[in-house]
Amino acid sequence: MESTLQKLDELKGDRSNVIKALQLIQVHEGFISDTSIREVAEAFSMPAVEVEGIVSFYAQFKRNQPGKYMISVCDGTACHIKGSPQVLHWISDELGIGDEETSDDGLFSIERVACLGCCSLAPVMKINDEIYGQLNRKKTMKILKQYQKEPAND
Amino acid sequence: MIKRIKVGAGSCGLAAGAGAVRDYLKEHITDIDIVDVGCIGHCYAEPIVEVETDSGSYFFEHVDVSKDLVENIRNLEGPSDFLGRPSRKDQEHIKVTALAGHIDPESIDEYIANGGYSGLEKALSMKPGDVVEEVKKSGLRGRGGGGFPTGLKWSFLAGKDADQKILICNADEGDPGAFMDRSMMESVPHQLLEGMLIGAWAMGATQLFIYIRAEYPLAVKHLTTAIEQVKKRGLNKIGDRSVDFNLKEGAGAFVCGEETALIHSLEGKRGNPRYRPPFPTDYGFKGYPSLINNVETFSNIPLLVREGGETFASVGTEKSKGTKLFALAGDVQYPGLVEVPMGITIGEIIYDIGGAEEGSVKAVQIGGPSGGCIPAELFDTPVDYDSLRQLGAIMGSGGLIAIGNNRCMVETARFFLEFTTRESCGKCTFCRVGTKRMLETLEKITGGNGTEEDIAFLSDIAPKIIKGSLCGLGQTAPNPVLTTLRYFENEYLAHVRDKQCPALQCDALVDLKLDKEKCIECNLCIKNCPVNAISDDYIIDNDTCTRCNTCIELCPVNAIERVNQGVKSV
């Protein structure tokens, strides 16, 4: 957090950097906490409610701690046509959590995203930074199993 | 002799496993250069390896990490012939994407060796005003969707006298189902930078911004590298001044494709659009005159300047010049990035290039959530700004999704309205509330509770939303509903009158039926049903069933199918 605060210090002279500051915080902490909102408001000398307004406007910003693995199910047009609602269905059933929810063990979160830009591999999902395409049920389950196993190896 | 090996490693390629292929090849072939390149457009064939030899290139598609691969590459055995597939070879007009997938995106030398920055050099030898004239002469129109004449827009900013002038590239490709800009930025980042530098010279811009989607990490990486290289080479010195690039990551808001909303977002604010005038060229970023073009528009500029406006204008139709990139996806055999001359018909793209079987596609969705659905009967429509508008669709940025016969058009319209409802910034009542009401009505219809009054309501509210909204988002949001109503009214009627979904897609109107004649009692469906809706004697309880289709996919003998309700299992 030290380094993030330093960066905030560099950015705070120019209000057009507010979004960048919030993005930095999210990269470091995974989400935007109430404390972060107050810090940003202070750094840019603006009301906290205005910062909250910016955070709530953009889809990228999360206000809750996400799971260790963020599963982003693409629901862009191509993926939707190719059955992304089913993919979401399978994953939800398997993990017992829905869109924008986090599992109790803090391992998985699911979010539906607008488009990952890999339309010719539809349907697609992304787990953290890894993209998986041409999903069917078998493939999806196999991928999930890998991640479910992984924490034991940590 | 093999000169080098290229691995298609755009985001699509990497998603398909190109990273593992590259690592494997590097481990097993140490005597030949192996490089990552961008996208050559044949996304359906990923991962792709191109082997450059003295006698031309050999392509390998759908490659697997295996010993055979290394052998095949060394012996040039079993390469794919997809460059020979119809229409992709015949594209003599391929220009904007000419270098995509052929050069190392992170090498400025390769870009220069292939004619890169010669457009900038030529522009710098011309008077700024003459460059603007050249763009006017070319007839280039904005590729982001609106189709506004680029040269005219440039002349607005060029004519401004201000101490700061801002040039902004809209790289916030928010239209779900479109990836042209991502491909260009990942594959040939320098082409965009060259286009912007030419623009800076022509219009006297002092600051250059690229507003890019945060969801495109690879594009951000390649652009960052390219910007550093440009600075190092001093290519950002135009005339007696130097201009700097600022890469700004957007934070996910479709409405930021609208110029004034984008500017607000650049300023660090909520991306609400505002009333125009004043137009951005009068009052833009922080009050300075600003001009916004999208990635594809800027990427056209180097070619246009190099070859001259007249040559550029020789391709295309009377009012739509040059080529257009389309992100072809959906129900076609060969989805990918295609570049076609303006004026080609939709059918040629879908059937000849996309490889869809004649009769298998009932519509295309063009222009994303702001566009419309065009039915197969009208596939001979030429692709140009004006013909598409006449059909109620728009060119849009280039998303082109083929919708197969087994997809429901009402559900497709609902999908788009769900998107626009979510993305409406909330400023205009008609957009904020109107799209929501439309979405609720569509949900009612796909949920099996619709009436004919609901269809009338949709037709009634749509033009009101168009009239009552300030920006492009609201003004075009009803398009998917209007076009599906116009061309596929029968599907709407089937939902409300007969309570049937002809495409068997709307879960609320569909039951699952198990055919006992076909069933081999393998138990797979029973074991895997997440809600235990299948009894031990193989009867599906449709009240419990969530229509997740798991059993349909697992059944080895296709004994389970979706049927319209009323046709209950025997």
Image (tube, coloured by chain):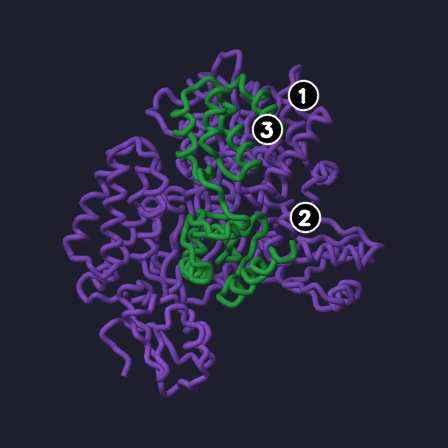
Q: Nearer the viewer, residue B252 or B112?
A: B252
Quarter of the rendering occupied by the C terminus of chain B: bottom left
* Residue placed furthest toward the right: B31
Kind of element beneath mark 1: strand
Q: Which of marks 1 and 3 is in front?
A: 3
Q: Are marks 1 and 3 on the same chain?
A: no
Residue bearing the label numbered 3: A4
Q: In the image, what residue type sits under mark 1?
A: Lys
Q: Identify the disc placed on residue B290.
A: none
Query: Considering only vertical position in the picture, is B491 above or below B367?
Result: below
Residue bearing the label numbered 1: B237
Q: Residue at x 76, y 67 (%)?
A: B67
Marks 2 and 1, the one that precedes in the sequence: 2
Q: Are marks 3 and 2 on the same chain?
A: no
Q: Which of B479 and B420 is in front in this view?
A: B420
How far apart in space, not on screen, are marks 3 and 2 (Cα)?
Answer: 34 Å
- Callout 1: few (<14), some (14-19), or many (20+) C-alpha neighbours within 10 Å? some
Q: Colour of chain B?
A: purple
Q: Identify the disc placed on residue B37.
A: 2
Chain under callout 2: B
Q: Which residue is drawn at 66% across and 64% down?
A: B80
Chain under callout 3: A
Q: Residue at x 50, y 38 (%)?
A: A31
Q: In this view, does B534 lie to the left or right of A2?
A: left
Chain under callout 1: B
Residue A136, position as x, y percentages in the image: 49, 65
Q: Residue at x 57, y 53 (%)?
A: A131
Kind of element beneath mark 2: strand
Query: Considering only vertical position in the picture, is B410 above or below B313?
Result: below
